[in-house]
């Protein structure tokens, strides 16, 4: 059982929880994630660790409320307990000094991007970050990102904050302007698909961190499988990051939508 010590809402549907997990706080690396459950019969939710405080023994998790499980998580209050939480899982991000990094985060994907941006900056890279969301109230962690970025561009679909346009517009501006050595994108699958198509055009190696459906998180159940370069890979143990130019995003989008009706029904029941 892991105690929630702090909770704040970034927006109506995006919540940040600070959770006691001393061993994970000490050993996690950028790119690692955890899987947690709320309630004995709860669904297992994978969440990337946005940051950690090794001294206090806490980790920061950011979740977007999309269904019953994330609603239950967001309904927890400081002092409540998460039924179980395992991690750190997944392979950490490969961090080295490659020169200039372009980091692009969409929506709640900005949370897992934060520790990666921090790690690339600490490794001596020039880091240019593009944050994107539908509107101003959905842009999260802007100040924290600014702290670790040499340049920060904010894009909103409706122009309510930063510049008006999609994440790819902000990315292309940078790709046209200067040489970028590596790109990392995290966000909705559809956003990562188009970001990958863009960087392929500019021949920039790109990693995408995938948010597949997960069950066991140990490579046994196959729920998180994706096709990368024509091979089946498991996001939980082979990822979560893969070469974005070889991911079959269309297949992934189809699989992510596979339980949409059941999720809608369950959410309606939860709010009855
Ligand atoms: Fe089961 Fe990855 S979650 S194999």
Image: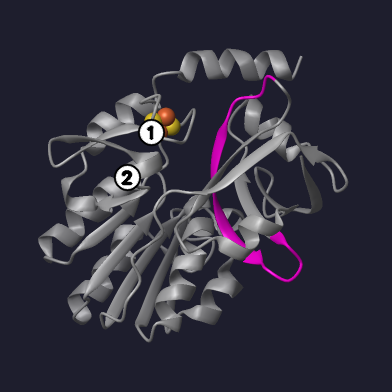
Front-most of residues 137 and 256: 256
What residue is at 44 percent from the left and 76 percent from the top?
152
What is the quadrant of residue 235 in the picture? top left
Whether the residues at callouts 1 and 2 have beta carbons within 8 Å, the answer is yes
Question: In the picture, which quadrant includes the C terminus?
Answer: top right
Give percent across and percent down for residue 6: 80, 55
* Disc 1 target residue: 219
Above or below residue 98? Residue 16 is above
Within 10 angstroms of label 1, few (less than 14), some, or many (20 or more) residues? some
Q: Which residues are magenta?
A: 41-58
What residue is at 59 percent from the left and 12 percent from the top?
265
Give percent across and percent down for residue 233: 26, 37
Front-most of residues 235 and 22: 22
Residue 238: which numbered mark, if any?
2
Q: Mark 1 or 2 closer to N-term?
A: 1
What residue is at 74 percent from the left and 20 percent from the top?
271
Above or below residue 13? Residue 143 is below
Query: Going by the image, does 178 lie left or right of 235?
Result: left
Give percent across and percent down for residue 122: 45, 82
Would residue 151 be visible to someone looking at this image? no
Real-space CA distance between mark 1 and mark 2, rounded to the nearest whole angstrom: 8 Å
Query: What element does badge 2 sit on?
Result: helix
């Amino acid at each position: 059982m892991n105690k929630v010590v702090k909770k704040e809402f970034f927006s109506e549907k995006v919540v940040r929880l600070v959770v006691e997990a001393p061993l994970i706080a000490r050993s996690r690396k950028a790119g690692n994630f955890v899987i947690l459950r709320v309630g004995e019969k709860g669904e297992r939710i994978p969440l990337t660790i946005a940051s950690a405080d090794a001294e206090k023994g806490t980790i920061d998790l950011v979740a977007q409320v999309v269904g019953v499980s994330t609603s239950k998580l967001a309904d927890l209050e400081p002092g409540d307990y998460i039924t179980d939480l395992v991690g750190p899982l997944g392979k950490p991000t490969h961090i080295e000094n490659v020169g200039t990094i372009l980091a692009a985060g969409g929506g709640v994907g900005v949370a897992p991007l934060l520790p990666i941006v921090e790690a690339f900056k600490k490794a001596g890279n020039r880091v240019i970050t593009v944050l994107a969301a539908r509107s101003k109230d959905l842009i999260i962690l802007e100040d924290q990102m600014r702290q670790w970025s040499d340049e920060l561009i904010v894009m909103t679909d409706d122009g309510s904050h930063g510049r008006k346009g999609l994440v790819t517009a902000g990315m292309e501006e940078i790709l046209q302007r200067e040489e970028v050595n590596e790109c990392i994108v995290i966000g909705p699958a559809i956003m990562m698909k188009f970001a990958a198509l863009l960087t392929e055009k500019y021949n920039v190696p790109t990693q995408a961190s995938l948010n597949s459906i997960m069950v066991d998180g140990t490579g046994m159940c196959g729920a998180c499988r994706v096709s990368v370069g024509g091979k089946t890979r498991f996001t939980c143990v082979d990822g979560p990051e893969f070469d974005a130019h070889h991911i079959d995003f269309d297949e992934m989008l189809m699989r992510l939508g596979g339980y949409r009706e059941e999720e809608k029904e369950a959410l309606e029941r939860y709010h009855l």
